[in-house]
Image: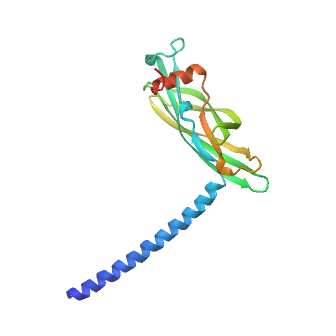
Amino acid sequence: MSEPVLAAKSRSTLRKLGALALAGAAVLLLAGCQTKAQIAACPVANVLANTADLYVFKKGMENDPSAEMYHVAVTGVHLSCDFDKEEGTTDSDIDVEFTATRAPTGDAANYTVPYFIASVLNGADVQSKKILATPFSFAPGEATVTFTANMPRFHTKFANGKKPYEYGILAGIQLTREELEYANKRRGLTP
């Protein structure tokens, strides 16, 4: 084939690829619009950072790092919701993701972690809170496990004139004051 024919075929191929890329971008933009509309109708879900970690110690050895039996961390929170515009409410299905770690041992172990889901207005005003617990297990020799707790149908009622995006859903571990202080110390937030 001559060079002019090859050049014409290359330009034709580039035009086709460009058209496909443009079509793909249009699909992504349309999908993004739908996602933004869905997001606008749901409260935003986040992990409350200073309640994301729980360290559990051997009995009588609290706050001694060498006596830590295991550590549990909230690693994410996701929600989907049904928005009722007429009632001014959402019902959210919430998944809270956890990771637990320990020193590898030969023993299987079963534990439970207490956690909470809270609805907040403008990032600070707690509207409602539910305290729950979820079990998890380490298999023999297992050092890390990941697990998810599901909270179906968490109901949020919007105050008159308030929009869904003014509300948030926070998830974290239900900590005692001592557990919170130790977790903050481990993160370097307290002297």
Up the image or down, 106 lies above or below 14; here it is above
| Rendering colour mode | rainbow
The single residue placed furthest to the front in the displayed view is 161
> Count the marks: how many?
0
Which part of the image, by quadrant, shows the N terminus?
A: bottom left
153 to the left or right of 55? right
Q: Residue at x 77, y 49 (%)?
A: 160
Q: Position of residue 67 (x, y in %)?
A: 46, 17
- The quadrant where residue 4 appears: bottom left
Res. 118 image quadrant: top right
Residue 163 sits above or below residue 23 on the image: above
In the rendering, at what x and y percent does residue 128 appear? 72, 37
5 versus 64 height, above or below: below
Residue 142: where, in percent of width, then height?
A: 45, 31
Outermost residue, right side: 87
Identify the residue shown where x is 38% and y is 75%.
Answer: 17
- Give the residue displayed 53% in from the left and 11% down from the top: 60
Q: Position of residue 35 (x, y in %)?
A: 58, 59
Which residue sits furthest top?
60
The answer to which of 83 and 122 lies nearer the viewer is 122
Seen from the viewer's position, the closer of residues 152 and 176 is 176
